Image (cartoon, rainbow, N blue to C red):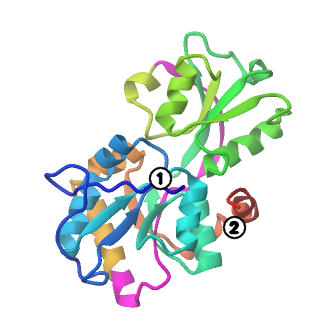
Amino acid sequence: MFSRRHFLGVPAAMAMLGSRPAALAADKPMRLGTLPVVSTRTAYEIYHPLLAHLEKAFNQSVILETPPNFKAMYQRVQENGFDLLVSPPHIARLAQKKLGWHPLVMCQPEHHSVLLAMEANGPANLEALRGGTLAVLDNSALVAMIMMDALSKRGLMMDRDFKVIETRSYESSQIAVKQGVAQAMISRSQGFIDPNARDRMKVLFEAGALPGYVFIAAPATSKDQLQNLRSELLTFGAAPAARPFLEKLGYDSVAVATEDAMRRLDPYLATTESKLK
């Protein structure tokens, strides 16, 4: 079942932010959906600057909601359960094409999908993974799709040559590798993994390009509202207060999510939709 987590904007702790923005209905809070990739506490730490900016810019209550996994996220997208969503790029494109959601901005730069193992006692190469276990945040995550495709081209197939365990967050995947429950983990090349722990891990294998996260707005959002949201997100991305937010996600900036950029996700649409059913 979908897990709703509410956090407070600036001084308070987890609850609903108080005030009212002009971007959406004045009598309702803005529902901001987040990626299900980190723990509740870490999500609040990451998104705190964005919450503060949206609260101030629109003078409206903002509720931060984090689904437990990507399937639950897409279910909420289908139900129009968010007003604004920070989405994995493949789910953003699916929501745009199938449900009429509006891409606003995309995080930059692109990353890669990487296999991380312990530096000291991890597998020496891909062949050493045969018979082993990989920790994966979610099999429907684009970072996992890209890696599984790359491994299959090198003769390593999930459920035949290695097992996969799904974890609750990148933090949980990291713990699984550290404790030896998994021999390696699938991750993005930047962001989320604690720098001190990352120093003790090695990149065992690197796969293809991974487009940045996309902020998407609900289908019913008016043209004026879309312009206001996009403008404020771009303003936030250029502000000093956005530095910690972007750095924790592994990005440097945000840019307008163009149709050309979104179209690059089309090869993943069929697989994405099948995994989210």
Rate crowding at label 2 as few (under 14), some (14 to 19) or many (20 or more) other CA atoms within 10 Å: few
Tell me which amino acid carries mark 2. Answer: Asp
Q: Secondary structure at mark 2?
A: helix
Q: Does residue 12 sit above or below 87 in this rendering?
A: above
Q: Position of residue 240 (x, y in %)?
A: 21, 54
Disc number placed over residue 109 in the picture, else none: 1
- The residue that disc 2 covers is 266
* Left or right: 259, with 16 as reference point: right
Disc nearest the viewer among 1 and 2: 2
Q: Secondary structure at mark 1?
A: loop
Q: Position of residue 112 (x, y in %)?
A: 58, 43
Q: Does residue 134 sit above or below 149 in this rendering?
A: above
**Residue at left 26%, top 60%?**
51
Q: Does residue 48 sit above or below 256 in this rendering?
A: above
Q: Position of residue 4 (x, y in %)?
A: 41, 57
Q: Does the magenta run of residues contain 190?
A: no
**Residue at left 47%, top 77%?**
218
Tell me which amino acid carries mark 1. Answer: Pro
Evaluate whether residue 217 shows in this view.
Answer: yes
Magenta segment boundaries in residue numbering = 200-227
Tell me the quarter of the image containing the N terminus.
Answer: bottom right
Tell me the quarter of the image containing the C terminus.
Answer: bottom right
Q: Position of residue 52 (x, y in %)?
A: 21, 60
Q: Looking at the image, do the residues carrying marks 1 and 2 touch, with CB atoms under 8 Å apart? A: no
Q: 263 or 170: nearer the eye?
A: 170
**Picture quadrant where residue 127 is located:** top right
Q: Does residue 68 sit above or below 192 in this rendering?
A: below
Give how far apart the Cα atoms at labels 1 and 2 are. Answer: 19 Å
Rate crowding at label 1 as few (under 14), some (14 to 19) or many (20 or more) other CA atoms within 10 Å: some
**Residue at left 80%, top 22%?**
130
Among numbered discs 1 and 2, the one appearing first in the sequence? 1
**Picture quadrant where residue 97 is located:** bottom right
